[in-house]
Image (cartoon, rainbow, N blue to C red):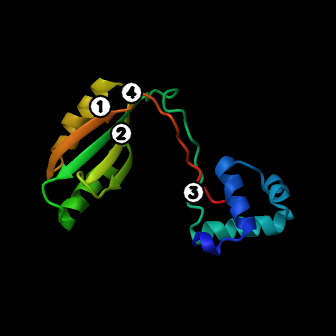
Amino acid sequence: MSLNELDHIDRHILNALQNNARISNVELARMVGLSPSPCLRRVKALEESGAIQRYVTLLDQGAVGFPVSVFVNVTLERQVETALEQFEAAIKKRPEVVECYLMTGDADYLLRVVTSDLANYERFLVDHLTRIPGVSSIKSSFSLKQVSYRTALPLK
């Protein structure tokens, strides 16, 4: 479902759920100006269409023991399909990699890695990332401070 296919009520529902996924259907219906049954039908339709993928709880990274964020640029020796698939399969197995993007430009991949400290990042780097076949270079940048972080998409 594309943004153009969403009417104003769907957008209102999605905005409300992005801000509070635990909102009750009754409260959501009140917020968007529907009765509970049609509101629930719309939410179910948004789930079935894939517009709503899943519901999650966002944790404070530092409060749960992962204060270090590292942005890692990874370049592969060759950008062939098998090398990309092998790298992506290996990365998906690593819980400390919370985001991974195939990129254009200087690096092939951009990763966001979270760890409890620099020693754990070094272990991840030495024991895992450098051992993935086809990796030719790795450049790490350490986050000093998170200035802005949003999970809500700008649907307005």
| Marks 3 and 2 close (CB-CB < 8 Å) | no
| Marks 1 and 3 close (CB-CB < 8 Å) | no
Whichever of labels 1 and 3 marks the residue nearer the N terminus, that label is 3
* SS assignment at label 2: strand
Cα separation, mark 1 vs mark 3, equals 29 Å
The residue indicated by pointer 4 is: 116
The residue positioned 87% from the left and 64% from the top of the image is: 35
Cα separation, mark 2 vs mark 4, equals 10 Å
The residue indicated by pointer 3 is: 54
Whichever of labels 2 and 1 marks the residue nearer the N terminus, that label is 2
The residue indicated by pointer 1 is: 121
Cα separation, mark 4 vs mark 1, equals 8 Å
- Quadrant of the image containing the C terminus: bottom right
Question: Residue 81 versus residue 137: which sits nearer the camera?
Answer: 137
Cα separation, mark 4 vs mark 3, equals 27 Å
The residue positioned 49% from the left and 27% from the top of the image is: 62
